[in-house]
Each structure stands twice: as C-alpha cells, then as structure tokens.
Amino acid sequence: MKVVDMHCDTISEIYKDHRAGGNASILENSMMIDLKKMQAGDYGLQNFALYTNLDRAEGKPFEYCMQLLDTFYNEMEAHRDMIGIVKSYKDIEENWKQGKMSALLTIEEGGVCQGELGFLRNFYRLGVRMMTLTWNYPNELAFPNKREMQENGRSRLVADTENGLTETGVRFVREMERLGMIIDISHLNDAGIWDVFRHTKKPFVASHSNARAVASHARNLTDEMIRALAERGGVVGINYYSCFLHDFAEGESEISHISHMVDHMKHIRNIGGIGCLGLGSDFDGIECELEMKDASQLSLLADAMSREGFSQSDIEAVFYKNVLGLYREIL
C-alpha cells in the first residue's frame, strides 16, 4: 500500500540537531521519519515542511527558512538514489517509474515571506509547492486559529473566529493559485479559511487537520468547512497528534490512538465523501505518545481501516490516490 503524507517537521528537527552539533541524517535517525522507515512503510511521497517558528526565528523568518531550505537540499541530494525532489506531477511519475520515493517541499508559516510577493515567487522558483498561510502567530497574511485573550488579569488562548485574511493575504492566495503553489489552510483561523474560499477558485488542502465535530480543538475543521473543501475538490490530511484526535478527560493519558484516526476518517467521509480524505501525519512535530510510532508502521492504520469497513479502494484513495489527484491538477 503506497503512502503519500502531506506533512512532517523532520527537516526542522534535523536542522536543530545539526545546530546543536549532531549528525542526524534523513537516511536513518531516531526520529519518526527517515528514508529507511519510509521504505519499510512503502512510502511513495512525503511532503517535507520548512517549519518556521516566528519566535525562534528571532525577527529573521526569511533567513531562518533559507537555512531549513539548505538542510532539505543537502539531505535529499545526498540520497538521490532513493528519493527525488519533485516540482511537477511529471517528476512524481518519473520517480515512481525509477522505483524512487518523492520529496515535495512545503513551507509551514507564510510569515517567512514577510509580506513580499517577490519572496513568495522566489520560494516557488526554489521548489516550494505548498504553503500554510500561518502557524501559531499572526503575520502579514493572516491569523492563526487561536488568539490570546485577557480575562481577570490573566491571559488565555481562545478560538479566533473574527480576523480574516489581510489585504496582503488576499494577494498572496491569488498569486499562489496563479503560480501553482498549493494553498494549505491548516493552522488558519475560521474567518481566514472562509476568505480563502471567497478569493480562490482551485482546490486546496488542509494538510494536517481533523474534524472539529469529533475533537473540538480549534485547529480542526467544522463540518461546513469539510463539505465546502470536498465540493472544491480539496483534501483533508488526517493529523496523528493526540490533541487533535480526541477530547481527553482530565487525568486521561493523551495517547495518539489509531482508532481515533479512523473515527475522524469515518466522520469526514460521511460529510465530504471518501474523495476528500488523505494523510497528514505531522510526524516529528508531535509531542505525545504514539500507537503508530513512525513511518514504518502505516500498515497498522490500513489494517484498522479495513476492520472498520473501509474497502481496499477506499484505503488506497486515502493513502495516496486522492492527494495525487489534486497534485496532478495543481502542480
């Protein structure tokens, strides 16, 4: 069973390891994703995000992202016999014919462009083919799913349902659509998501998000969003992070269970159909205990789906066909 995964933070983790004096490699490491684990899991394609925490970037998000970009190319080029960087759908097909896996470059945090359309176009020229508009901080383009609220002298995070895309953000999504860079609405707040629908025409993705009706976290999508995304031809990538999978009771162990992933799949299928479902693991960005521990164990998810009534064709659609269909249309 081939696997196409729309999101991981592995490049950021390798970069941090190198900065600390380590020698982690994409070939083999102690993380959730490396090439050997991907081969064991029968991966066809992995999206590798240049995940940029604006706080960690210390006022230089573009420069920080360029360091991540260098790490990505160094790692992939060192193992080009196993994995090929893809910039078009034809590249994916060619790698498939050669028996190689594919690496698609993405950005997680549109703030790395610092509001400059020229930066966006240059990232496209450098191979970036998907980008989230935000991560967890407001930027020049949009607002994240939560905002800080002062209450009785204390601050707490609440869902941000009010602030939509900025004027710059609207220009960005239109330019991304023109370029053929896939818009990723994961992390974006509700008003911003609806603005993306209003200002674009092509399919887009929520690369690593789940269903809010199943787990109430504001990072997840409402049924209305899922339905609209499906009607647009977009795809939701199931996120394996426990806090987006289940509303845990106080004292309950927050473990990422495969059964919870399947619960989200069943709900999303019921709302938008099997065609809007994909995988978006968030591997190496997950800070919880995992039942499916790394990229080598995806067969556990396929088996669980089969037990819950998903047909073989359904499983193939979720594991790779739906996402590849969108890539064929956009890239």
Image (cartoon, rainbow, N blue to C red):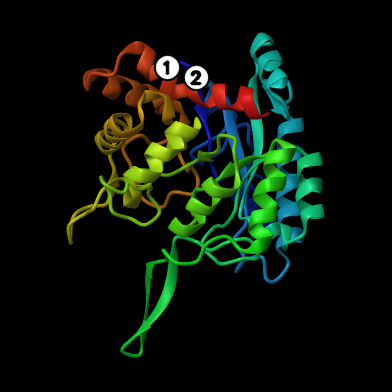
Q: Nearer the viewer, residue 49 or 165?
A: 165
Residue wearing tag 1:
316
The residue sitting at the top extreme is 97
Tags 2 and 1 touching, CB below 8 Å? yes
Vertical position of residue 191 compared to residue 152: above or below: above
Q: Amino acid at mark 1?
A: Glu
Where's the N terminus, which quadrant? top left
| Residue 168 vertical position relative to residue 202 in the rendered view, above or below | below
Q: Is residue 64 left or right of residue 227?
A: right
Residue depicted at 49% across the width and 34% down the height:
232
Q: Quadrant of the C terminus?
A: top right
Helix, strand or loop at disc 1? helix
In the image, 8: left or right of 141? Answer: left
Quarter occupied by residue 29: top right
Q: Amino acid at mark 2?
A: Lys
Q: Residue at x 32, y 43 (%)?
A: 223
Q: Position of residue 93 (x, y in %)?
A: 67, 15
* Crowding near the residue tagged with mark 2, few <14, some 14–19, many ≥20 C-alpha atoms within 10 Å: many
User: Which of these two is toward me, 153 or 98?
Assistant: 153
Q: Residue at x 81, y 40 (%)?
A: 125
Q: Which residue is mark 2?
A: 321
**What secondary structure is marked by label 2?**
helix
**Mark 1, other Cα within 10 Å: few <14 / some 14–19 / many ≥20:** some
| Whether residue 128 can be seen here | no
Where's residue 203, x and y in %? 56, 34
